[in-house]
Amino acid sequence: MNKHYLQSKVKSTGTAYLLWFFLGAHYAYLGKWGIQILYWLTLGGVGIWALIDLFTMSGKVNRHNATIFQQIEEIEKKERDAEQARNMAMIAAAKGN
């Protein structure tokens, strides 16, 4: 995956709270459509689920973003390793001449 594409998938806690308040669409914002449809069908767990989400929203967004940041970190590590391998190959070629 492209690092810039992943960076565009990072979500904001503020936006998630706005979507929770106005539309109840915070799970859709995080890409969890199955849970979102269940949330709508149960009317936010008759309000109980909605109240719980009020206090757990930042954790949900942080977990979503942590997965993305981990993938970005793996891509950057591969890029660093490839750069180091290129540098070592250039040094070895220079010593060989």
Image (tube, rainbow, N blue to C red):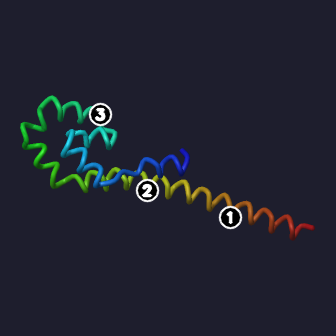
Residue 90 placed where, x, y %? Answer: 80, 64
* Horizontal relation, residue 78 to residue 86: left or right: left
* Horizontal relation, residue 93 to residue 26: left or right: right
The residue depicted at 44 percent of the width and 55 percent of the height is 70
Distance of label 1 from label 3 (alpha carbons): 41 Å
Residue 69, numbered circle: 2
The residue that mark 1 highlights is: 84
Q: Earlier in the sequence, mark 3 or mark 2?
A: 3
Q: Earlier in the sequence, mark 1 or mark 3?
A: 3
The image quarter containing residue 50 is top left
Asked if the residues shown at circle 3 and circle 2 are in contact, with their CB atoms under 8 angstroms apart, the answer is no
The residue that mark 3 highlights is: 33
Please state which of the two labelled residues, at mark 1 or mark 2, is closer to the viewer.
Answer: 2
- Circle 3: is it few (<14), some (14-19), or many (20+) Cα within 10 Å? some
Q: Secondary structure at mark 2?
A: helix
Q: Quadrant of the C terminus?
A: bottom right
Q: Secondary structure at mark 1?
A: helix
36 versus 30 height, above or below: above
Distance of label 1 from label 2 (alpha carbons): 22 Å
Q: How many marks?
A: 3
Q: Secondary structure at mark 3?
A: helix
Q: Quadrant of the N terminus?
A: top right
Q: Amino acid at mark 3?
A: Trp
The residue depicted at 15 percent of the width and 29 percent of the height is 41
Residue 91 placed where, x, y %? Answer: 80, 68
The image quarter containing residue 22 is top left
The image quarter containing residue 89 is bottom right
